[in-house]
Image: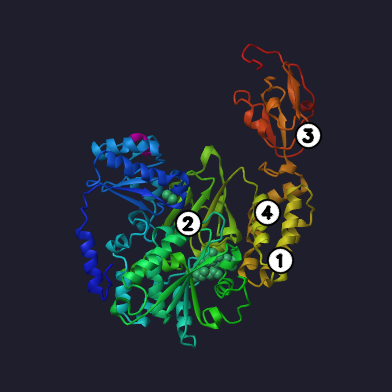
């Protein structure tokens, strides 16, 4: 690899790369993000290599393994360029047909296309999941081969760095980021430019810049996918930030459980070194900077800024009081600027396209786009990048394709475990930092969990508190004890043992935990509880006063019941009950012994839909007649097996 000593060298390299490429040559890209790898994308890739060889197409077709495309639920994704034909759920067995039909005969394999209301969609960009997105940060993932720095450079990569280092002063870079009003994507939404300025102006020669790739929110994987698929964009942003701040040493704190991200990032660092984009005298600018990768052990609390910096020092990653901000006194007491993966990856765009362009996207207080991890009870799950200000409704229904199995939307949880739950009445809320906070939730790092009518909101609050209780580092009492006590109350409500005073007690403890905890883990932990009480108080009351779980989730409060009028005495549920709680006979309707029943739901699952005799009740009160079997006269349509 040649060392690049100037902007001209970089541009020359870019031109050389482009000159060697034929834009009309077919290129099969196979998504190798973690989601698609779980579906077996590596075997699909190998099948393509083999099949292309078998057909003697090695010289005529390129193959590339790329980062996550976002539509992980439909993996393995295969996109064939230049037409951008998109095949979904591709299995190794499909490969011979794709090669012979699409690559040889130039025809489409219909059955592997996305179907939208009966219409087949050929091009990736026309799939509704993608059509409504603005993938300015995440979009290049699908164009860059794993560990191919030249793919990044071909797309204009590192030209923002060249511009910053060779055409702008550090102050100009800083002002551009401030003018863009880039707010941190890792949770707090703090203006990046202001934080950079604090570190820059803090006393001391030695300063650090850090990438937060801890990503501990359950269900979130935006940062992982960016680091796996486009690590150079994060690196480029980091070097630009270091230049603006006056730092010569950076760290990437990435969780150990992200092996592909660690591997691809480490390769990216080696490549950047070889090209002279890291190390001394970067691009001949005289500026020197280096980066170390630190693998975190996977504690949620270690994503908090002071805890992360403590972990980087080699000490247990627990938060410390921030009388002095980490931007002034961070790692080893030196000024340290921490930003999230997505925040850093956005910086090169701001420098190349300008603050005005960036500030033209989004809302008054929240500029640019945000990547969300759209999961839960929604048809199209995956990673979506949308302009700030898009409504929740558009994200969930237009991009996410609505709720599966004809169920009704109930709520969406945003902001990770310490975010809040938002009900249907707020679906037209524009997504931005401030609007989400106003309704009792938050943007967080971009987790978005959709819930349908079968979700119990008390159980949801319990789920998140259980997570947070386990992740609390235990250093401060309000968080350690407060979350635990709230969890105990939620447990007893879900078990039907809640008392009339419990809602008030939850609110009271929330207040203390919020105000007295050492770090934002505790300070935001009450959000799931307070937001569910705010919007779904009736569900709490049903659990407490009526000993009923309206969504039919809390096991201690529900029962299964066989309707005698519908039961055809077919014996199926009786034979499938794992605890032999069902009695009855060939001519006797079946009855569930409520004392023996473990509420596993297998009777409901196996009861033939044409009978539909088993019902899940939202309380423990089972109608009297169901306590005894009655005789069934089989009318010919029903047969005992
Ligand atoms: C308990 C806890 C966990 C956090 N985890 C992460 C994380 O995994 N990734 C992240 O970027 N920020 C995380 N944050 C936020 C960071 O403390 C910090 O605000 C952020 O990394 C700063 O970057 P940004 O300004 O670019 O968002 C966490 C905060 C708390 C309180
Ligand atoms: S991993 Fe393939 S689309 Fe996300």
Q: State the separation of the CA atoms marked 4 and 3.
A: 26 Å
Label whose residue precedes the other's in the sequence (4 or 2): 2
| Residue beneath disc 3 | 596
Badge nearest the viewer, 4 or 3: 3
Q: Residues within 10 Å of mark 4 (few under 14, many from 20)?
A: many
Q: Residues within 10 Å of mark 1 (few under 14, many from 20)?
A: many
- Kindly indicate whether the residue at mark 3 contacts the one at mark 4 (C-beta within 8 angstroms): no
| Residue beneath disc 2 | 372
Would the CB of label 3 be found within 8 Å of ligand 1?
A: no
The quadrant in which residue 226 appears is: bottom left
Label whose residue precedes the other's in the sequence (1 or 2): 2
Q: Residue furthest top?
A: 636
**Residue 145, position in %: x, y?**
34, 55
Q: In the image, which disc is placed on residue 480?
A: 1
> Of 219 and 391, which appears nearest the observer?
219
Q: Secondary structure at mark 1?
A: helix
Answer whether residue 629 is visible to the viewer in this image: yes
Q: Residue at x 37, y 81 (%)?
A: 170
Q: Residues within 10 Å of mark 3 (few under 14, many from 20)?
A: few
Q: Which residues are magenta?
A: 110-116
Q: Secondary structure at mark 2?
A: strand
| Residue beneath disc 4 | 462
Q: State the separation of the CA atoms marked 1 and 2.
A: 30 Å
Q: In the image, which disc is placed on residue 153?
A: none
Q: Residue at x 39, y 40 (%)?
A: 90
**Residue 584, position in %: x, y?**
75, 22
Label whose residue precedes the other's in the sequence (2 or 3): 2
- Kindly indicate whether the residue at mark 3 contacts the one at mark 2 (C-beta within 8 angstroms): no
Label whose residue precedes the other's in the sequence (4 or 3): 4
């Amino acid at each position: 690899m040649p060392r690049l000593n100037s902007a001209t060298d970089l541009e020359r390299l870019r031109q050389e790369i482009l000159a060697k490429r034929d834009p009309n040559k077919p290129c099969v890209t196979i998504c190798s993000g973690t989601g698609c790898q779980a579906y077996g994308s590596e075997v699909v890739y190998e099948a393509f290599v083999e099949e292309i060889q078998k057909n003697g197409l090695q010289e005529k077709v390129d193959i590339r393994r790329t980062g996550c495309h976002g539509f992980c639920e439909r993996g393995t994704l295969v996109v064939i360029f230049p037409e951008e034909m998109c095949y979904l759920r591709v299995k190794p067995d499909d490969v011979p047909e794709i090669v012979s039909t699409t690559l040889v005969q130039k025809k489409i394999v219909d059955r592997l296309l996305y179907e939208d209301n009966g219409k087949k969609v050929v091009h990736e960009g026309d799939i509704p999941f993608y059509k409504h997105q603005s993938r300015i940060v995440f979009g290049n993932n699908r164009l860059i081969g794993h560990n191919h720095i030249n793919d990044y450079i071909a797309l204009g990569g590192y030209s923002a760095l060249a511009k910053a280092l060779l055409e702008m002063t550090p102050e100009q870079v800083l002002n551009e980021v401030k003018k863009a009003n880039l707010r941190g994507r890792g949770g707090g939404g703090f203006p990046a430019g202001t934080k950079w300025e604090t570190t820059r102006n803090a006393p001391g020669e030695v300063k650090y810049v850090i990438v937060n790739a801890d990503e501990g929110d359950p269900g979130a994987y935006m940062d992982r996918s960016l680091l796996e698929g486009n690590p150079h964009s994060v690196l480029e942003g980091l070097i630009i930030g270091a230049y603006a701040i006056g730092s010569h040493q950076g760290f990437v704190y990435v969780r150990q459980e992200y092996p592909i991200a660690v591997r691809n990032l480490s390769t990216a660092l080696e490549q950047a070194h070889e090209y002279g984009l890291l190390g001394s005298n970067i691009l001949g600018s005289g500026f020197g900077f280096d980066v170390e990768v630190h693998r975190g052990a996977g504690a949620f609390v270690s994503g908090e800024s002071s805890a992360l910096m403590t972990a980087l020092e080699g000490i247990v990653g627990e938060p410390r009081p921030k009388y002095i901000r980490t931007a002034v006194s961070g790692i080893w007491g030196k000024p340290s600027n921490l930003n999230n993966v997505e925040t850093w990856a956005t910086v090169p765009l701001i420098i190349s396209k300008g603050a005005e362009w960036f500030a033209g996207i989004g809302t008054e207080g929240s500029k640019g786009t945000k990547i969300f991890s759209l999961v839960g009870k929604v048809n199209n799950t995956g990673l979506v990048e949308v302009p700030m200000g898009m409504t929740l409704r558009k994200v969930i229904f237009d991009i996410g394709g609505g709720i599966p199995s004809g169920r009704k939307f109930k709520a969406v949880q945003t902001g990770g475990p310490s975010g809040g739950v938002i009900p249907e009445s707020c679906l037209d809320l524009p997504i931005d930092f401030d609007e989400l906070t106003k309704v009792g939730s938050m943007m967080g790092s971009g987790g978005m969990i959709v819930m349908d009518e079968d979700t119990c909101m008390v159980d949801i609050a319990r789920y998140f508190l259980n997570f947070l209780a386990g992740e609390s580092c235990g250093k401060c009492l309000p968080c350690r004890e407060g979350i635990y006590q709230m969890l105990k109350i939620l447990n007893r409500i879900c078990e039907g043992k809640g008392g009339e005073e419990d809602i008030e007690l939850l609110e009271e403890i929330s207040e203390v935990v919020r105000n007295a905890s050492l770090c934002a883990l505790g300070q935001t932990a009450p959000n799931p509880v307070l937001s569910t009480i705010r919007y779904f108080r009736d569900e709490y009351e049903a659990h407490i006063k009526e000993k009923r779980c309206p969504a039919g989730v809390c096991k201690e409060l529900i029962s299964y019941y066989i309707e005698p009028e519908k039961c055809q005495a077919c014996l199926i549920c009786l034979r499938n009950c794992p605890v032999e709680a069902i009695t009855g006979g060939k001519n006797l309707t079946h009855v569930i012994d409520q004392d023996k029943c473990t509420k596993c739901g297998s009777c409901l699952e196996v009861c033939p839909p044409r009978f539909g005799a088993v019902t899940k009740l939202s309380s423990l009160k089972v109608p009297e007649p169901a306590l005894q079997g009655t005789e069934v006269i089989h009318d010919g349509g029903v047969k005992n097996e």
